Amino acid sequence: SYELTQPPSVSVSPGQTASITCSGDKLGDKYASWYQQKPGQSPLLVISQDKKRPSGIPERFSGSNSGNTATLTISGTQATDEADYYCQAWDSTTAVFGGGTKLTVL
Amino acid sequence: QVQLQESGPGLVKPSQTLSLTCTVSGGSISGDSYYWSWIRQPAGKGLEWIGRVYTIGSTSYNPSLKSRVTISVDTSRNQFSLKLTSVTAADTALYYCARGRDGYNSFDSWGQGTLVTVSS
């Protein structure tokens, strides 16, 4: 079965750039999506189709996908960005999520 | 703005069937190219996709759950449903319903989630 691998945790200082990676076999041939989940809340789509931001998502969120790795980049990270982040892709007709990355802003 | 709301029993006994319904409001469930999914999350763990249904009735399921899962849709009630048979404690989780759209490859609207505990 297809797997997506994320680092369990990433730390960043306020105002700096955070990068969260998601690795999978030939992931660049698929579309990657990213979700933000804060404690007690439902996941929120922040990036779709590798790099598209849904309406209402701040410009500091961006995405890329090439080779075997998709990356979520948060520029000028704010304390409110502290959350769990999940990548997701489709393997044929099966949706697959990465294990999630806890972003700590300190 | 479409909204999704899960409903169903919060406690299910082992070996029994878990049944949940997702009610869609603020838009038709029969909207263009949408599909409707169930996704679960055990406490403190990550997201697991269970399956999806299109309003024409076609379905696809997570291979790891396929033998136990049925997802159906009722367009007259603007609802879709999940049935998971032969549950065990490992099925205890927060269950979300979510909307996806062909060509967008992502889930753009989510319910608030409903906790289902499997215990005798």
Image (cartoon, coloured by chain):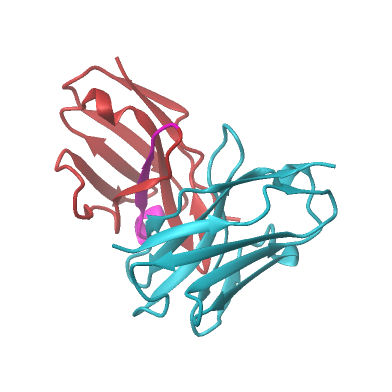
Q: Colour of chain A?
A: red
Q: Quadrant of residue B19?
A: bottom right
Residue B24 against residue A5 in the figure, above or below: below
Q: Is residue A41 left or right of residue B12?
A: left
Q: Is residue A33 left or right of residue A78?
A: right
Residue A14 against residue A83 in the figure, above or below: above
Residue A81 coordinates in the image, percent (x, y): 28, 30
Q: Which residues are magenta?
A: A26-39
Residue most toward the top? A106
Q: In percent of the image, x 66 and y 62: which residue is there?
A: B63
Q: Is residue A50 magenta?
A: no
Residue B47 coordinates in the image, percent (x, y): 53, 45
Residue B94 against residue B38 in the figure, above or below: above
For the C terminus of chain B, the image quarter is top right
Q: In percent of the image, x 17 and y 42: which residue is there?
A: A58
Count of numbered labels shown in the rendering: 0
Q: In percent of the image, x 54 and y 40: which residue is there?
A: B46
Q: In percent of the image, x 45 and y 71: which residue is there?
A: B35
Residue B10 coordinates in the image, percent (x, y): 67, 47
Residue B34 coordinates in the image, percent (x, y): 39, 73
- Which chain is cyan in the picture? B
Q: Return the residue nearer the eye: B78 or A28.
A: B78
Q: Return the residue nearer the eye: A100 or B30.
A: B30
Q: Return the residue nearer the eye: A35 or A32.
A: A35
Q: Is residue A28 magenta?
A: yes
For the N terminus of chain B, the image quarter is bottom left
